[in-house]
Amino acid sequence: MKKTLCIVLLVALLLPASLVAQGSKESAAAKSTVEYTPVGTFPIVKTPITVDIMVAQPPCVEDYNTNRFTKYMEELTGIKVNYIMIPEQAATEKLALVLASGDYPDAFLGFGVNNTLETTYGAQEGLFMPLNKFYSKEWMPNMMKAFEEFPGGIGFMTNIDGNIYSLPRLEGCYHCSNQAKLFVYQPFLDKLGMKMPNTTDEFYQVLKAMKEQDANGNGKADEIPLAGSIIGWSDQVERFLLNSFIYTDLDTNINANADDNVGYMMNNGKVDTAVNKPAFREGLAFINKLYKEGLLYNGSFTQDSSQLTQLVESSAQPVVGFAAGGWRGQFATIGGERFNNFRAIAPLKGPKGAQYSVAFFQNPEIGELVLSSDTKYAEAIMRYFDFMYSPEGTLLQRNGFKGEAWDWAKSGQVGLDGKPAVWQQLKLWNDKDPQNDTWIQTYTAAMTPSLKNGLASKPMTQDNPEYYLPGNNEKTLFDETFNLYKPYEDTSVEVPVLKYTAEESEKFSTVKRELANYIRQSAVKFMVGSLDVNDDKVWNEYVANLEKLQLKSVLDLMNTAYARQYK
């Protein structure tokens, strides 16, 4: 009975995509000959065609099929796309189901197909089409032009079998390269008469004062000195604090990638780990001290960013003193009083002098668009998306329409980096609220460093009342990253992205996942005290379990891949 029910449910889940994909194949067979215009001209096809693309749908896009930008692309190119929308939280599962069904759309957009999946579905099973020939100025001039600002990017996209199976998202986000930030609610410091902390000791004293001296002045002991979340863009407090003890690229969210942000680091030219080192233990002990004394909000290891925002914003009087996040919008309402009054703080110097800002490499994001190997419309799809890699295409799909949401810069305007501006923003970018004007969350776009930093900004200093307002947000983020985080960045200790053979992936995928989960879960347990980080017996047992879970074998594998790619 259960088996029958499972089959019925699976068929029901796959049926809509299967029918659409089957229709696509019949349509492709009937119209296998497409007449194209010369590359670089529009429309792309002489006679309109329809292609089927399955897309991971974020909450901020109401409907890809009726979206204004989608309609614009259809008018521009002559290509109608039937977007088969899958909620992004179900995207990974749905991708596997559709690929197992044997009936595919022409392409998959926004599924973030990683190197392992490219190896499995591309190199091994041949379900994804190799795109090598399209990686040329002849076919995709806009994308290739954008790649000039990402040295080594083409190599990064290349699978270990020598093929390229996807189109990337190219994001030259300066402030994202040091995203493990911490912010303080400045009015609390002013009320307490305290300065911005520079060391972990000073930080502890400020937290104590916030808790004990009525920082918000309402006569209640309701202050929350420090808060973060376990799910959210660098909302984890430990991503900031552990780096005052040892360089630690750790994301404690167990759903995060098993290869990335698990505490690995480079040590004298070899891949090593922070998570079995005495300094890592000292960092966990410091955070546990904050937790035990009520200085760190206990929900920081269970909540997501929306709950963190509610914590910051819901009370009549502000209560949160320090909040972790990649930017203020992770934990505060854009343009609200609290958003406007949080200030970034530099990495804290630890008791032994450690003071790191984690470096996040601005590599291409692979797997944003993959083509089914049997699609008849590869050239049409490639040229359709190549437009989106142009500066105009990127701004149209990300920000909105020219003259409404953005425009080209005027003579004399200056960019974020002090150079002549390229473009100006007319309407605030918002990825929180649902809309149907543009795609907002871009998958195939090129926000290159020159385009990102070419955003026009008003010359102003921090004492200007408008400096921290949303309209100046990109400039604020640029300046904070340049002044507070870049001085403490050491890219030589960050592990670059590693690629594995199909055999290596098959052999170690489960091992790496189990090891990553153990590291992340143990770190949280140490920080909240369910494991006593100060007990030698408990710590030694944790280290022994790392070896039982094959930490040494995983490090050996990573060093093999590193030597193969970078030596």
Image (cartoon, grey):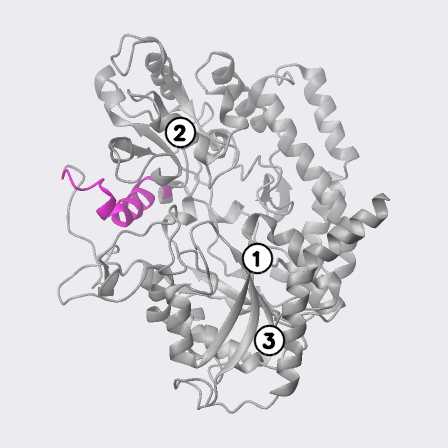
Single out the mark in the foreground, 1 or 2: 2
Instruction: Answer with left or right where residue 438 lies relative to residue 493.
Output: left
Mark 2, residue position: 310
Magenta-drawn stretch contains 468: yes
Mark 1, residue position: 112
Q: Is residue 362 visible?
A: yes
- What x and y, as percent, mark residue 111? 58, 58
Tell me which numbered mark, 3 or 1, is placed earlier along the sequence: 1
Helix or strand or loop: what does disc 3 sit on?
A: loop
Tell me which numbered mark, 2 or 3, is placed earlier along the sequence: 3
Q: In terms of image quadrants, where is residue 39?
A: bottom left
Magenta-drawn stretch contains 234: no
From the viewer's perspective, is residue 104 above or below residue 58?
below
Q: How crowded is mark 2: few (under 14 residues within 10 Å), some or many (20 or more)?
A: few
Q: Which amino acid does label 1 sit on?
A: Gly
Q: Which amino acid does label 2 sit on?
A: Gln
Number of numbered tags placed on the structure image: 3
Single out the mark in the foreground, 3 or 1: 1
Q: In terms of image quadrants, where is residue 476?
A: top left
Which region of the structure is painted magenta? Answer: 464-485
For the N terminus, give its image quadrant.
top right
Helix or strand or loop: what does disc 1 sit on?
A: loop
Q: What residue type is labelled 3?
A: Leu
Helix or strand or loop: what does disc 2 sit on?
A: helix
**Residue occupying image coordinates x 58% and y 36%:** 253
Mark 3, residue position: 131
Q: Pointers 2 and 3 in contact (CB under 8 A)?
A: no
